[in-house]
Amino acid sequence: MAERKGITLTYIQDQSNARVFFDEYCLTTALSNLLDNAIKFTERGEVICRSYRAPDGRLCVEIRDTGIGISRKYLPHLFEPFSQEQMGQYTPTGPGADTEVFGIERR
């Protein structure tokens, strides 16, 4: 879908040889949904997926886009079940959905 819309899709791996013990279905579904939404709500620009090790040792996955973003007013409700923000307006420098998806403790 990104290619069809002319959106650049980039993956940056800042952490190599990371071992993750997680339910494959849940992890794949969560990341797929986040990437699909980032692409869906980005009219032009790019979507970047980055994995990295946080200073406290957690392995993190970050998805950034140049889409319409999530309003600050809606942020407290972001992870409520069955919650969805109404469509916003596109801004060329929109913050996109800058959301930390998973933090995994180092063992």
Image (spheres, rainbow, N blue to C red):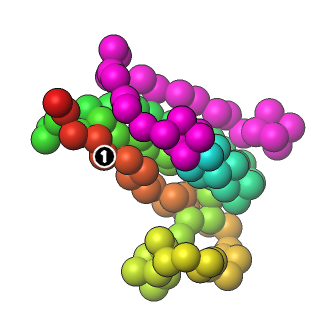
Q: Residue at x 56, y 65 (%)?
A: 69
- In the image, residue 66 sits, relative to residue 56, either above or below, namely below
The furthest residue to the bottom:
73
The residue under the point 42% across, 50% down is: 101
In which quarter of the view is residue 43 placed? bottom right
Relative to 36, 80 lies left or right = left
Vertical side of 76 occupied by 21: above or below: above
Quarter of the picture containing the C terminus is: top left
Residue 31 can be seen in this image: no
Residue closest to the eye, 33 or 86: 33
Q: Give the residues drawn in magenta, as a range.
A: 1-28
Q: Residue at x 69, y 49 (%)?
A: 36
45 and 98: which one is in front? 98
Amino acid type, residue under disc 1 in the picture: Gly
* 20 and 16: which is toward the camera: 20
Q: Does any portion of residue 44 appear in the rendered image?
A: yes
Q: Residue furthest right?
A: 4
Q: Position of residue 71 (x, y in %)?
A: 51, 77
- Percent of width and height locating residue 100: 38, 52
The residue under the point 49% across, 40% down is 23
Residue assigned mark 1:
103
